Image (spheres, grey):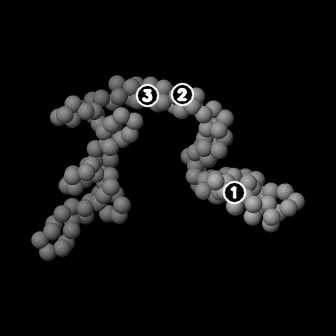
Amino acid sequence: MGGAARTLVKAAHPDGAPLVLDPFAGIGSIPFETLRVGAEGFAGDLNPVAVLMLKTALEYIPTYGNRLAEAVQKWGEWVREKASAELKEFYPPEPDGSTPLAYLWARTVRCEGPGCGAEVPPGGAAVAFPQGETTGSLALLRRQGNQAG
C-alpha cells in the first residue's frame, strides 16, 4: 500500500524524506498519510483527547499491539463493573433484563408539516435512537457484546 506514492515522494525529494508538520492533527488523517507515503512528520493538537488518540494509534499500538488491547479490555471491564455497581440505582434494568450503559438525552422539535406532529431530534442526533424507536427524547444505549447499540 502506498508504493506508487512512496516512489513519487522519493523522486520529488531525492535528498531525504520530506518533513510534514500538522499542528492541528485532530485524530490523525495527515499523520497517517505522512507515514503511508514515507515522509517524516510531527503532529499535535490543542485537544488532549485528540492527542491521546494520536499517541495511541501512532505509538502505543505499534509498540504494544495485542497486549495493549487486552489491557484496555481488562481495565475497561473493571471500570464498567465498578461504575455499574455504584450507579445501578440510576440505571434500572430494562423489561428484557438488559442493563442500560447510558442514557442520551436529545432536544426534539415538533414537525410542523400538515398531519405530521412527529418529534424529531435536530441534525444528526436521530441516529442515536435504537432502530424502530423514533418517539420521545430519550435514547437508550445497551451493551451488546463488545459494542453499544
Identified by mark 2, the residue type is Ala
Q: Secondary structure at mark 2?
A: helix
Identified by mark 1, the residue type is Gly
How many neighbours does mark 2 have within 10 angstroms: few (below 14), some (14-19), or many (20 or more)?
Answer: few
Report whether 34 appears left or right of 16: left
* Residue with the most extreme right position: 15
Estimate the x, y position of residue 19 in percent, counting from the top left. 78, 57
Q: Are marks 2 and 1 in contact (CB under 8 Å)?
A: no
Identified by mark 3, the residue type is Glu
Could you tell me which residue is drawn at 60 percent across and 56 percent down?
A: 29
In the image, which is nearer the foreground, mark 3 or mark 1? 1
Disc number placed over residue 3 in the picture, else none: 1
Which callout, 2 or 1, points at the residue further toward the start of the chain? 1
Disc number placed over residue 77 in the picture, else none: 3
Instruction: Estimate the spatial distance between the alpha carbons at disc 3 and disc 1, rounded to whole Å.
Output: 40 Å
* Residue occupied by mark 2: 71
* Closer to us: 10 or 61: 10
Estimate the x, y position of residue 92 in percent, counting from the top left. 24, 32
Could you tell me which residue is drawn at 30 percent across and 58 percent down?
A: 126
Quadrant hosting residue 67: top right
Could you tell me which residue is drawn at 69 percent across and 61 percent down?
A: 4
